[in-house]
Amino acid sequence: MDNRLTAANNDRQMSVGARLIRQFIDKLRARDATVDRIRSAEALVRGVHFRDYEERSSCRLMQFSHARADEVIDRFCEENGWDESSRNDLKFSAHMLDADQKSDTFIRFQKVGESEFFVHFIALKRIEETIFFGLARHHVKFKLSPNVKVTERNTWIYKNWWNKMRRNKNSPPTPEPEFEEETVPAEDMTLLENFFLLRALKKFAEDIPSSVNELQHEERQFLTMGSDYDF
């Protein structure tokens, strides 16, 4: 109990940005995002022809009163083209913050075309009557126009794209086979999901470097997985 109280007190002394980054890191750890797994995903993506793959990250930090949560979430979902189901899921997460220091982390994969999607990584933290909303978003566009099924909730299927990525870039072209959902193991899907989530998190952390300095050494090390940034 004493250790938990000490951890809670330490958390309260951190800036909001540092607390949100810690939430993101804890969520990725819970999804088994290890160094080896992130490196495996990175190596896979590097094998794709540059002309066939683009990505960019963005982030946002906002705050609003707990009483205005539904209003702000409605506006956010409208601006970003979220469907009703995802809107309700995000509202539910906000409603769960029914007391000071409550927090939640939300993930959503959104297909926006035949060859692109957004990865939304959201950390919610309530401090007294204010909700802090940290958004880390990663936009991936692949010009292979594969038959990819991306649901409006929290899971997706790669199908042709995944299989094209795995091929040696020097291999001769082959006819496009049909793939069943079972051909993409759940473990492989999680591998790339975690990679894109980490890319989004790094952009969020890059924009608030002073908050990163408040983190423990092992948490800062977590942010250096992959080859983008060194904190």
Image (cartoon, rainbow, N blue to C red):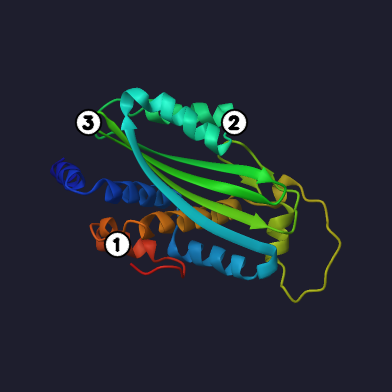
Disc 2 residue type (three-letter): Asp
Q: Residues within 10 Å of mark 2 (few under 14, many from 20)?
A: few
Compute the Cα span from label 1 to label 2. 37 Å
Where disc 3 sits, the SS reads: loop
Residue 10 place in picture, x, y as percent:
17, 48
Pointer 1 or 3: first along the chain: 3
Q: Is residue 214 visible?
A: yes
Q: The N terminus appears in which quarter of the rendering?
A: top left
Residue that numbered label 3 is attached to: 128
**181 vs 160: above or below:** above
Disc 3 residue type (three-letter): Glu
Q: Which mark is residue 83?
A: 2
Residue 102 place in picture, x, y as percent:
29, 33
Q: Is residue 92 visible?
A: no
Pointer 1 or 2: first along the chain: 2
Mark 2 near mark 3, Cβ–Cβ under 8 Å?
Answer: no
Compute the Cα span from label 1 to label 3. 29 Å
